[in-house]
Image (spheres, rainbow, N blue to C red):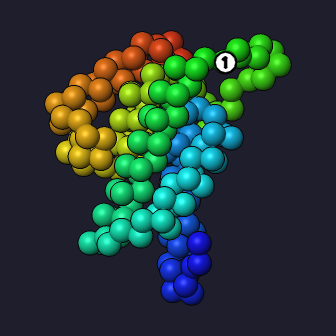
Amino acid sequence: MQITNDVGIYIASVVEKYSDMVYRAAYHALCDRHYAEDITQEVFLKLMRSLPDFESDEHEKAWLLRVTINMCKTYNRKTYSHPTAELSETIVSKERFGTGPVMEAVMELPEKYRTAVYLHYFEGYKVAEIAEMTGTNQNTVSSLLMRARQRLKTMLEGEFDDENK
């Protein structure tokens, strides 16, 4: 594929601007650094191949997140349909994005909750925007966020009791 100078400059600027965000979204969806890196590369390759015409920077950002989420869903479907043997937790531990009990609890949530939590709390998207990005109903997104908060509350009970005394 021959890349013109203008396209190369554009892709480089988009990668510089959004690569961290795309990686974080993939990592939150997959909980695996290596697969998140692969997905990040695939997202920018897809951008380079399709070169969509974006209305604004926000539209561009939303497109990148939507492609990232869709690629992670596809990866998860392939993984679940072709399971592999997992190495012992003593040999390989899950890498965590960030530290602390809250982040660990978020990373233990099922993917559908992690994605909603990530887009809402880490990227600052509203329920309607998340619904559009993920192709789901707004009520579904609201329910996912509510259930995720309930699960997190249950998971974290007792973690912060000492701070309130």
Q: Is residue 120 above or below residue 161?
A: below
Q: Is residue 42 above or below residue 91?
A: below
The answer to whether one can see residue 98 in this image is: no
Going by the image, does 91 lie left or right of 84? right
At x 22%, y 28%, the residue is: 140
At x 48%, y 59%, the residue is: 46
Residue 65 in percent (x, y) is at 41, 51
At x 30%, y 29%, the residue is: 145
Mark 1: which amino acid? Thr
Image quarter (top left, top right, bottom left or bottom right) of the N terminus:
bottom right
Question: Which residue, as the protein is rendered here, is positioned at the far bottom?
Answer: 5
Residue 68 in percent (x, y) is at 46, 47
Secondary structure beneath dot 1 equals loop
At x 64%, y 48%, the residue is: 37
Residue 118 picture quarter: top left
Question: Which residue, as the protein is rendered here, is positioned at the far front?
Answer: 1
Residue 151 in percent (x, y) is at 39, 17
Residue 15 in percent (x, y) is at 55, 66
Residue that numbered label 1 is attached to: 84
Residue 135 picture quarter: top left
Residue nearest the viewer, comparing 139 with 68: 68
